[in-house]
Image (cartoon, grey):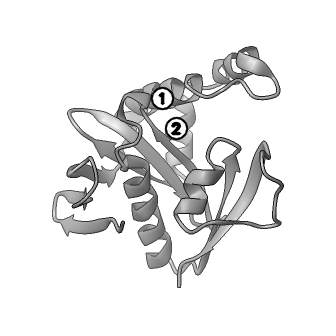
Amino acid sequence: MMNHLRVFSNGWQSCSPNGSREVVNLRIATEADCEEIYRVQMAAVRNLPGGAEGKAGIEKWLAGQQPSVYRHSMAEESFVVAEDDGIVGWGALSVPKQEITNVFVDPAFHRQRIGTAILAKLELLAGEAGIDVVQLQATGTAIDFYSANGYRPDPPVAPGADWALMKKRLA
């Protein structure tokens, strides 16, 4: 199923005519969004399986995250947020690195194609910036999501891998 992006003067809307979510508003994030971006990431990461280090490892990593981290990153990356009565997901693109650095969706909004809409918008921004091949680092739980959206592990990884460097040709 294809996601369609419609661009409006006040932002973007992503439509999935046959999906469970009809419309989600997408826009470029501002520093005023950092608290909500932080909240979404914390909820999404806490919802992940523990992995090799267990839930304690996740909590240790989360302890180093603060809203100020996003304010700093916004100076170097393009942040996109998805809204539905508040921020429900977000993603970021580093043009210099030609890399999508983050895509997170609030667990209460999983399986509604919001992550796919965010990813499509980041890819559109990457293409507009002249990027032909975009890369990202996917955790084991996200490899299938990115594969379903046209990304391929490079180099290939074994099934059940903890992470993968993945790439997609945009042009």
Q: Residue furthest bottom?
A: 171
Q: Earlier in the sequence, mark 2 or mark 1?
A: 1
Q: Position of residue 42 (x, y in %)?
A: 53, 25
Q: Nearer the viewer, residue 42 or 68?
A: 42
**Label 1: which secondary element:** helix
Q: Quadrant of the N terminus?
A: bottom left
Q: Is residue 15 left or right of residue 81?
A: left
- Mark 2–mark 1 CB contact (< 8 Å): yes
Residue at (78%, 67%) from the top-left corner?
154
Q: CA distance from mark 2 to mark 1?
A: 8 Å
Label 2 crowd (10 A; few <14 / some 14-19 / many >=20): many
Residue at (42%, 32%) from the top-left corner?
106
Q: Nearer the viewer, residue 1 or 164?
A: 1
Where is 7 relative to 94, above or below? below
Q: Which residue is mark 1?
A: 38
Q: Nearer the viewer, residue 77 or 41?
A: 41
Q: Residue furthest top?
A: 56
Residue 70: which disc?
A: 2
Residue at (28%, 67%) from the top-left corner?
5
Label 1 crowd (10 A; few <14 / some 14-19 / many >=20): some
